[in-house]
Amino acid sequence: MQFGMHGSLEQHGFARNTVWTIDKDPPPFPTVSSNKAFIDLMLKPSEDDPKSWPHRFEFRIRIALGPGGDLMLTSRIRNTNTDGKPFTFTFAYNNYFYLTDISEVRIEGLETLDYLDNLKDRDRVTEQGDAITFESEVDKVYLKTPTKIAILDHERKRTYVLRKDGLPDAVVWNPWDKRAKAIVDLGDEEYKHMLMVGAACVEKPITLKPGEEWKGRQELSAVPSSYCSGQLDPHKALRLG
Ligand SMILES: O=P(O)(O)OC[C@H]1O[C@H](O)[C@H](O)[C@@H](O)[C@@H]1O
Protein backbone atom coordinates (compact mmCIF):
# COMPACT_ATOMS: atom_id res chain seq x y z
CA MET A 1 0.00 0.00 0.00
CA GLN A 2 2.47 2.58 -1.22
CA PHE A 3 4.29 3.23 -4.45
CA GLY A 4 8.06 3.70 -4.10
CA MET A 5 8.86 6.33 -1.50
CA HIS A 6 5.59 8.21 -2.11
CA GLY A 7 4.39 7.81 1.49
CA SER A 8 5.73 7.30 5.00
CA LEU A 9 6.52 3.56 4.75
CA GLU A 10 9.57 1.71 3.43
CA GLN A 11 10.15 1.47 -0.37
CA HIS A 12 6.88 0.18 -1.95
CA GLY A 13 5.24 -0.28 1.49
CA PHE A 14 4.64 -3.59 3.27
CA ALA A 15 1.94 -5.35 1.19
CA ARG A 16 4.51 -6.89 -1.17
CA ASN A 17 6.56 -8.38 1.69
CA THR A 18 3.69 -9.88 3.64
CA VAL A 19 2.19 -13.37 3.54
CA TRP A 20 -1.25 -13.31 1.86
CA THR A 21 -3.94 -15.95 2.28
CA ILE A 22 -6.20 -17.55 -0.33
CA ASP A 23 -9.91 -16.87 0.07
CA LYS A 24 -11.43 -20.30 -0.61
CA ASP A 25 -14.97 -18.92 -0.75
CA PRO A 26 -14.64 -15.66 -2.70
CA PRO A 27 -17.63 -13.42 -3.32
CA PRO A 28 -18.75 -13.08 -6.94
CA PHE A 29 -17.44 -10.02 -8.80
CA PRO A 30 -19.71 -8.64 -11.50
CA THR A 31 -16.73 -8.02 -13.82
CA VAL A 32 -15.51 -11.63 -13.95
CA SER A 33 -17.36 -13.84 -16.37
CA SER A 34 -17.48 -17.61 -16.12
CA ASN A 35 -14.81 -18.30 -18.77
CA LYS A 36 -12.01 -16.85 -16.64
CA ALA A 37 -10.00 -18.74 -14.06
CA PHE A 38 -9.43 -16.70 -10.93
CA ILE A 39 -8.09 -16.70 -7.41
CA ASP A 40 -8.67 -14.20 -4.60
CA LEU A 41 -5.78 -13.36 -2.28
CA MET A 42 -6.37 -11.53 0.99
CA LEU A 43 -4.23 -9.36 3.18
CA LYS A 44 -5.37 -8.34 6.65
CA PRO A 45 -3.52 -6.59 9.45
CA SER A 46 -1.04 -8.68 11.41
CA GLU A 47 1.21 -8.14 14.40
CA ASP A 48 4.17 -7.75 12.03
CA ASP A 49 2.76 -4.66 10.32
CA PRO A 50 4.78 -1.49 10.79
CA LYS A 51 3.82 0.61 13.78
CA SER A 52 3.67 3.54 11.34
CA TRP A 53 0.52 1.95 9.84
CA PRO A 54 -1.78 1.55 12.86
CA HIS A 55 -4.92 0.67 10.88
CA ARG A 56 -7.34 -2.17 10.30
CA PHE A 57 -8.01 -2.96 6.66
CA GLU A 58 -8.97 -5.67 4.23
CA PHE A 59 -7.06 -5.88 0.95
CA ARG A 60 -8.43 -8.32 -1.61
CA ILE A 61 -6.78 -8.92 -4.97
CA ARG A 62 -8.52 -10.99 -7.62
CA ILE A 63 -6.13 -12.44 -10.20
CA ALA A 64 -8.07 -13.62 -13.24
CA LEU A 65 -6.78 -15.26 -16.41
CA GLY A 66 -8.79 -15.19 -19.63
CA PRO A 67 -8.76 -18.01 -22.22
CA GLY A 68 -6.48 -15.97 -24.54
CA GLY A 69 -3.91 -15.34 -21.80
CA ASP A 70 -5.05 -11.88 -20.75
CA LEU A 71 -4.47 -11.13 -17.09
CA MET A 72 -6.84 -9.09 -14.95
CA LEU A 73 -5.90 -7.80 -11.54
CA THR A 74 -8.60 -6.23 -9.38
CA SER A 75 -7.61 -4.82 -6.01
CA ARG A 76 -10.12 -3.79 -3.37
CA ILE A 77 -9.00 -2.08 -0.20
CA ARG A 78 -11.47 -1.43 2.63
CA ASN A 79 -11.01 0.58 5.78
CA THR A 80 -12.19 -1.58 8.70
CA ASN A 81 -10.94 0.72 11.47
CA THR A 82 -13.14 0.68 14.55
CA ASP A 83 -11.63 3.87 15.99
CA GLY A 84 -13.29 6.09 13.37
CA LYS A 85 -9.98 7.02 11.71
CA PRO A 86 -9.48 7.40 7.95
CA PHE A 87 -6.28 6.21 6.25
CA THR A 88 -4.42 7.29 3.13
CA PHE A 89 -2.28 5.32 0.69
CA THR A 90 -0.70 5.30 -2.77
CA PHE A 91 -0.81 2.24 -5.02
CA ALA A 92 0.93 0.71 -8.06
CA TYR A 93 0.97 -2.56 -9.96
CA ASN A 94 4.65 -3.06 -10.82
CA ASN A 95 4.55 -5.13 -14.03
CA TYR A 96 7.87 -6.24 -15.44
CA PHE A 97 7.72 -6.84 -19.19
CA TYR A 98 10.27 -9.13 -20.82
CA LEU A 99 11.32 -7.44 -24.08
CA THR A 100 13.64 -8.32 -26.93
CA ASP A 101 15.66 -5.09 -26.90
CA ILE A 102 14.84 -2.02 -24.81
CA SER A 103 16.38 0.32 -27.40
CA GLU A 104 13.76 -0.87 -29.91
CA VAL A 105 10.80 -0.46 -27.56
CA ARG A 106 8.18 2.30 -27.72
CA ILE A 107 5.33 3.21 -25.42
CA GLU A 108 2.14 4.71 -26.82
CA GLY A 109 -0.35 6.62 -24.72
CA LEU A 110 1.94 8.72 -22.52
CA GLU A 111 3.13 11.31 -25.07
CA THR A 112 2.93 14.99 -24.02
CA LEU A 113 1.78 14.14 -20.47
CA ASP A 114 3.19 15.55 -17.25
CA TYR A 115 5.23 13.21 -15.07
CA LEU A 116 6.98 13.20 -11.71
CA ASP A 117 10.66 12.40 -12.22
CA ASN A 118 11.86 10.15 -9.38
CA LEU A 119 15.44 10.72 -10.58
CA LYS A 120 15.06 14.46 -9.93
CA ASP A 121 13.37 14.67 -6.52
CA ARG A 122 9.96 14.06 -8.13
CA ASP A 123 10.12 17.26 -10.17
CA ARG A 124 7.06 17.72 -12.36
CA VAL A 125 8.07 17.73 -16.04
CA THR A 126 6.12 17.69 -19.32
CA GLU A 127 7.02 14.87 -21.74
CA GLN A 128 8.49 16.29 -24.94
CA GLY A 129 8.63 14.69 -28.39
CA ASP A 130 6.13 12.47 -30.09
CA ALA A 131 7.48 9.02 -29.21
CA ILE A 132 8.47 7.51 -25.88
CA THR A 133 11.61 5.43 -26.37
CA PHE A 134 14.51 4.45 -24.08
CA GLU A 135 18.19 5.32 -24.10
CA SER A 136 19.02 5.89 -20.41
CA GLU A 137 17.72 5.31 -16.88
CA VAL A 138 14.02 6.14 -16.44
CA ASP A 139 12.00 6.35 -13.22
CA LYS A 140 8.80 8.31 -13.89
CA VAL A 141 5.22 8.59 -12.70
CA TYR A 142 3.05 9.77 -15.61
CA LEU A 143 0.02 11.70 -14.39
CA LYS A 144 -3.61 11.47 -15.47
CA THR A 145 -2.93 9.04 -18.29
CA PRO A 146 -5.43 7.52 -20.72
CA THR A 147 -6.98 4.22 -19.66
CA LYS A 148 -5.08 2.38 -22.42
CA ILE A 149 -1.28 2.24 -22.78
CA ALA A 150 0.60 0.14 -25.35
CA ILE A 151 4.16 -1.20 -25.06
CA LEU A 152 5.50 -2.11 -28.50
CA ASP A 153 8.26 -4.71 -28.83
CA HIS A 154 9.32 -4.14 -32.45
CA GLU A 155 11.67 -7.09 -32.80
CA ARG A 156 9.12 -9.59 -31.56
CA LYS A 157 6.32 -7.77 -33.44
CA ARG A 158 4.31 -7.93 -30.25
CA THR A 159 2.39 -5.26 -28.38
CA TYR A 160 1.41 -5.45 -24.74
CA VAL A 161 -1.78 -3.56 -24.02
CA LEU A 162 -2.42 -2.29 -20.52
CA ARG A 163 -5.93 -1.11 -19.62
CA LYS A 164 -6.81 0.35 -16.28
CA ASP A 165 -9.60 1.71 -14.21
CA GLY A 166 -9.50 3.65 -10.91
CA LEU A 167 -5.76 4.19 -11.36
CA PRO A 168 -5.12 7.58 -13.00
CA ASP A 169 -1.29 7.42 -13.12
CA ALA A 170 1.27 5.08 -14.71
CA VAL A 171 4.78 4.24 -13.52
CA VAL A 172 7.64 3.52 -15.94
CA TRP A 173 11.04 2.27 -14.77
CA ASN A 174 14.23 0.92 -16.30
CA PRO A 175 17.44 1.04 -14.22
CA TRP A 176 19.80 1.06 -17.24
CA ASP A 177 23.41 -0.13 -17.02
CA LYS A 178 24.89 1.58 -13.95
CA ARG A 179 21.99 1.07 -11.56
CA ALA A 180 21.43 -2.48 -12.86
CA LYS A 181 24.88 -3.41 -11.53
CA ALA A 182 23.75 -2.47 -8.01
CA ILE A 183 20.59 -4.62 -8.13
CA VAL A 184 21.47 -8.08 -6.85
CA ASP A 185 18.67 -10.02 -8.53
CA LEU A 186 19.09 -8.34 -11.93
CA GLY A 187 21.99 -9.45 -14.16
CA ASP A 188 24.24 -6.65 -15.47
CA GLU A 189 22.82 -6.96 -19.00
CA GLU A 190 19.22 -7.80 -18.12
CA TYR A 191 18.07 -4.17 -18.12
CA LYS A 192 18.20 -4.48 -21.95
CA HIS A 193 15.31 -6.94 -21.84
CA MET A 194 13.01 -5.42 -19.23
CA LEU A 195 10.71 -2.51 -18.67
CA MET A 196 8.43 -1.85 -15.75
CA VAL A 197 5.13 -0.20 -16.70
CA GLY A 198 2.25 -0.22 -14.27
CA ALA A 199 -1.10 1.32 -13.46
CA ALA A 200 -0.84 3.49 -10.35
CA CYS A 201 -2.38 6.10 -8.12
CA VAL A 202 0.44 8.27 -6.82
CA GLU A 203 -0.14 11.97 -7.39
CA LYS A 204 -3.40 12.10 -5.43
CA PRO A 205 -3.27 9.50 -2.64
CA ILE A 206 -6.50 7.65 -1.82
CA THR A 207 -8.18 8.36 1.53
CA LEU A 208 -10.77 5.94 2.93
CA LYS A 209 -13.01 6.53 5.92
CA PRO A 210 -14.09 3.50 7.99
CA GLY A 211 -16.47 1.37 5.95
CA GLU A 212 -15.31 2.82 2.61
CA GLU A 213 -13.77 0.68 -0.12
CA TRP A 214 -11.51 1.55 -3.05
CA LYS A 215 -11.13 -0.48 -6.27
CA GLY A 216 -8.29 -0.39 -8.83
CA ARG A 217 -8.27 -2.61 -11.90
CA GLN A 218 -5.63 -3.44 -14.48
CA GLU A 219 -5.83 -5.70 -17.51
CA LEU A 220 -2.87 -6.90 -19.59
CA SER A 221 -3.00 -8.57 -22.98
CA ALA A 222 -0.52 -9.33 -25.75
CA VAL A 223 -1.36 -8.84 -29.43
CA PRO A 224 0.63 -8.90 -32.69
CA SER A 225 2.00 -5.40 -33.43
CA SER A 226 0.39 -5.40 -36.86
CA TYR A 227 -2.86 -4.51 -35.10
CA CYS A 228 -2.75 -0.75 -34.98
CA SER A 229 -3.65 0.94 -31.73
CA GLY A 230 -7.10 2.16 -32.72
CA GLN A 231 -8.34 -1.29 -33.72
CA LEU A 232 -7.07 -3.54 -30.98
CA ASP A 233 -9.18 -6.58 -30.34
CA PRO A 234 -6.98 -8.74 -28.09
CA HIS A 235 -9.22 -11.80 -28.21
CA LYS A 236 -9.45 -11.89 -31.98
CA ALA A 237 -5.78 -10.97 -32.42
CA LEU A 238 -4.56 -13.70 -30.06
CA ARG A 239 -6.49 -16.36 -31.95
CA LEU A 240 -4.91 -15.27 -35.20
CA GLY A 241 -1.45 -14.69 -33.73
O1 LIG B 1 13.66 -2.72 -6.59
P1 LIG B 1 12.30 -2.35 -6.10
O2 LIG B 1 12.30 -1.88 -4.65
O3 LIG B 1 11.31 -3.45 -6.35
O4 LIG B 1 11.81 -1.13 -6.94
C1 LIG B 1 12.02 -1.04 -8.30
C2 LIG B 1 11.69 0.38 -8.78
O5 LIG B 1 10.30 0.59 -8.62
C3 LIG B 1 9.81 1.86 -8.97
O6 LIG B 1 9.81 2.06 -10.32
C4 LIG B 1 10.55 2.98 -8.30
O7 LIG B 1 10.14 4.23 -8.78
C5 LIG B 1 12.02 2.80 -8.50
O8 LIG B 1 12.72 3.84 -7.83
C6 LIG B 1 12.46 1.44 -8.02
O9 LIG B 1 13.83 1.31 -8.18
Image (spheres, rainbow, N blue to C red):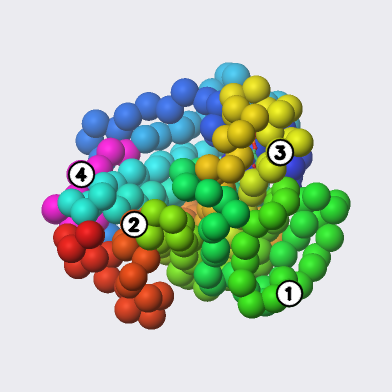
Q: Nearer the viewer, mark 4 or mark 2?
A: 2
**Residue that carries the numbered disc 4 in the rendered image:** 37
Question: Which three-letter amino acid code belongs to the residue tagged 2?
Answer: Ala
Binning the other alpha carbons within 10 Å of mark 2 as few (below 14), some (14 to 19) or many (20 upward) gives many
Q: CA distance from mark 3 to mark 1?
A: 24 Å
Binning the other alpha carbons within 10 Å of mark 1 as few (below 14), some (14 to 19) or many (20 upward) gives few
- Which residue is more in the foreground, 118 or 207? 118
Examine the structure image and report whether residue 39 is included in the region drawn in magenta.
Answer: yes
Q: Nearer the viewer, mark 4 or mark 3?
A: 3
**Residue that carries the numbered disc 3 in the rendered image:** 177
Which percent across, then down, holds residue 130?
Answer: 64, 77
Decide if residue 221 is in sight here.
Answer: no
Which percent across, then down, holds residue 180?
Answer: 68, 34
Left or right relative to 229: residue 127: right
Q: CA distance from mark 3 to mark 2?
A: 27 Å
Which percent across, then down, holds residue 202?
Answer: 66, 56
The first of marks 1 and 2 along the sequence is 1
Question: Which three-letter amino acid code belongs to the residue tagged 3?
Answer: Asp
Instruction: Name the residue located 69 percent from the left edge and 43 percent from the top edge.
Output: 176
Secondary structure of residue under mark 1: loop
Question: Which three-letter amino acid code belongs to the residue tagged 4?
Answer: Ala
Secondary structure of residue under mark 4: strand
Image: magenta residue range: 32-40
Viewport quadrant of the N terminus:
top right
**Residue that carries the numbered disc 2 in the rendered image:** 222
Secondary structure of residue under mark 3: helix
